[in-house]
Amino acid sequence: MSPLPTARYDDRRRTFPALGARSERTGTWWGEAWVEALEDLALDPARLARGRKYAQAGHVDAITVTPGRITAYVHGSRPRPYRTELRLRTLPDQAWEDFLDTAAQDPAHIAALLDKDLPHTLADQVDLLPAAGDLVPDCSCPDDGYPCKHAAALCYQTARLLDEDPFVLLLMRGRGEQETLAALTRRNTARMAVERETPAPELPTVAAREAVQAASRPELPPPFPPPPRAGHPPAFPTLQGAPDALALDLLATEAAARAHALLTTGEDPIASLTEWQDAVRLAAAHPGSGVTSTTRSLYAALSRATGRTPTDLARAVAAWRQGGLAALSALETPWDPPAGPFDRARPALTAAGHPGFRPWRNHLSTPTTQLRYGRDGLWYAYESDPGREDWWPRGIAAQDPVGALDAWVDR
């Protein structure tokens, strides 16, 4: 990887000069996860492609990173560049305490961070990497795409910064490099002091005559407690003639997750799913919505196996991420709900400033927005372009229609 450009350093604000043009990106696993989070929220893959070309051509000016915000000016088709921004939720104090405690417990974690490496264990501890819908783009351009090509270009260039320095990701989530390293140093010093003061345990001894005497066998020790979560599979290289790396990763991840569920609950979490539901669950577990090269082959294989189109699968994945099996049912199965909670929804929406919803079975619709009442008693928000009736799940489920709609609009 090329050296990171020299930054005007401030622990809570870092500004990086414009990155040069690059035809292809080869980065770290956390940089790829950042790109997949962007591609997962995109409504229009064509805008992503144009944004990638903007980034590769060097249209993004200096990038400024502060807690919860990344900003830059991006050159488009007009002479004056557009001010573009990406917002990201910062982590609460308790999440940072958990992250620092986990890092300080293993000196290898601290060494990895100092070497500009981000171990999977630390990233998973507090969900450092953005999940689907975690990135919120904004741009001064007139394009109403989500995201527009300028915001997409900024996100692709930000991934290059993350490849070189994972502390940029920590700053986005709320903590600067100096602050993080100082906290780790304090914890490491305290841990070493405790280890020095703790006397070494006395090893048990057995007399020789007792060792050779017949004795009853002791009871077996209790079984080890199950781990808190399923482990991560190893990294499978892509080699000529070797099995498909994505397929191996998928098999290993599925086996670990099902084994952990059986061990902790005694039940197989996917035994009752249909072939289609299981295909949607598998696709939803891999970020990218079939847009990235790493998941495109998976989506194509699942679509062929279930007799559905990739668009059907992508829509179902969006519903699954909205609320699992219940949300998928709300997407695919209209039904006639009881009158009470459904009939109260329209007056509640009108009172909250959302009039004009038309009812049909368990749907309430406007030309561009729709709410669906699920059999689980939750409301699910949908979006479509005017006149297309091409509804896509958005936001998260809520117990009241206003909450479901506002939760999506606020994002």
Image (cartoon, rainbow, N blue to C red):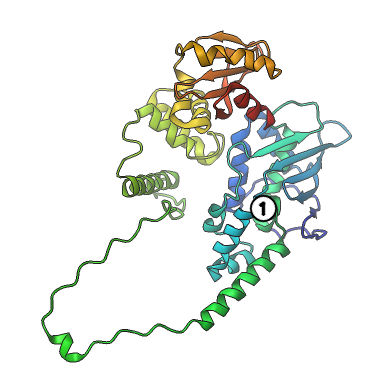
**Image: 180 above or below 360:** below
**Image: 245 above or below 135:** below
Q: Residues within 10 Å of mark 1 (few under 14, many from 20)?
A: many
Q: Quadrant of the N terminus?
A: bottom right
* Residue 368 placement: quadrant: top right
Q: Nearer the viewer, residue 256 or 376?
A: 376
Q: Say left or right for 236 vs 58.
A: left
Q: What residue does disc 1 label?
A: 169
Give the x, y percent position of residue 251.
38, 45
Give the x, y percent position of residue 169.
67, 53
> In the current view of this chain or complex, which residue is farthest to the right?
79
Q: Nearer the viewer, residue 247 or 375?
A: 375
Which residue is at a point 67% across and 27% down the rendered structure image? 409
Res 19 visible: no
Res 271 visible: yes
Q: Say left or right for 353 vs 106.
A: right
Q: Amino acid at mark 1?
A: Leu
